[in-house]
Amino acid sequence: MEKCLQSVYGFVDEIVVVDTGSKDRTVEIARSFGLEVFNFTWSDNFASARNAALDLSSSDWILSLDADEWVEADWAATYHSLQNPKTAEAILIEIDVKCATSFGGDYTFLAPRLFRRTDLRWYNRVHEKLLKPQGNDPELGQFDPSVLKIVDIGYQNELDCRIKAQRNYALSLSELADSQKVSSDRESIAQKLFEVGRSLVTLGRREESLQYFEGARNGTENLMLRLQSTDFLARQLLSLQRFDHCKEVVTSLRKIGGDPKYCDWLSCQALAQTGKPREALALLRGLNSAIDTLGINVNSDRISEFRLLCQQLVDLSN
């Protein structure tokens, strides 16, 4: 919490701290900065907590942070961009997550954490999304990480990762059940299916996740959700060593507009595992980076290591 506040204190017009019942020194630390702390009764709903902070804010632009995050920013460049009237309604910010190796290691993704204070609200109990009241996505821009980025250290500890994964699974499953009871909105249900699948993957329950990703991609007309659910389905099939099925799903991902480089990355892994390292190597030539459907960068070292492995397999077969 202290590093979070240090990263923005003196650079922003106001800081709103909402506490959902912390048991650590969060409140004490916030008050040491001279800040008022607003209490919010935790209701198993991350969007409600974020919206409570949003309702207490008065600035034109909102930067939404968690206590285990901090900002690294070129504030002059940030202010200059925000003063431009053509700047989008919400800004995608790179978030660098420091994650336990057993849960996949460090990764980076994009999220709209900086946005104009308009009619935008947070939705979903977990994996919350910033949307317009009609459920539409806001107009999005993106900041280069040299201008502003967020560092998240909330997943460094393996035990914390598992506890959070269990919590997120319970919340997403509950939200899906509620949606299926009271709503006939296929898009809403498809989104909830996807979130349950993601939570199961984090828990290592890949086999169970398949039905949720299949349900999500078959139940939505939203292109982004279809891309993401198809991507996640392909990845789980790859991990479960169902390589032929994985290749079929990757072909589907290409057809609906998946990034060609990222599709090549998925395909080459399946090809190498099915005795076709030469074909895999052909896809890897010139492939130095790839970004998945969530905006997460594939580790370039991982690509290089896999290219070397494929080359060694080819050499052995000669």
Image (cartoon, rainbow, N blue to C red):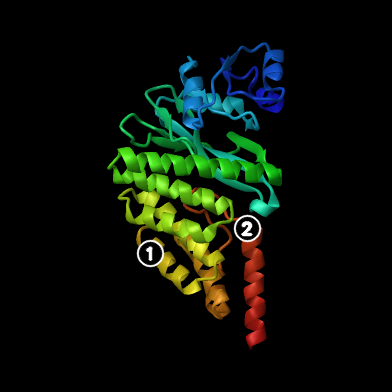
Residue 163's label in the rendered image is none
> In the structure shown, which secondary structural element does the residue marked by tag 2 occupy?
helix
Between label 1 and label 2, give the one nearer the viewer: 1
Task: Please state if 56 lies on the left or on the right of 157 as rendered.
Answer: left
Percent position (x, y) of residue 20? Answer: 58, 24
Q: Residues within 10 Å of mark 2 (few under 14, many from 20)?
A: few
Residue at 53 percent across and 57 percent down: it is 290
| Quadrant of the rendering where the N terminus is positioned | top right
**108, 156: nearer the viewer:** 156
Q: CA distance from mark 1 to mark 2?
A: 25 Å
> For this view, does 43 lie left or right of residue 6?
left
Picture coordinates of residue 85 (x, y %)? Answer: 40, 24
Q: Residue at x 69, y 44 (%)?
A: 159
Is residue 194 something one can see in this rendering?
yes
Q: Which residue is mark 1?
A: 252
Q: Quadrant of residue 183?
A: top left
**Amino acid at the residue labelled 2:** Ser
| Residue 110 in the image, given as x and y percentages of width and height | 52, 42
Relative side of 267 to 23, left or right: left
- How far across and down, in percent of the image, does residue 6 sit? 69, 23
Residue at mark 2: 300
Q: Of the two numbered discs 1 and 2 on the same chain, state the one appearing first in sequence.
A: 1
Q: Is residue 282 visible?
A: no
Tell me which amino acid carries mark 1: Ser
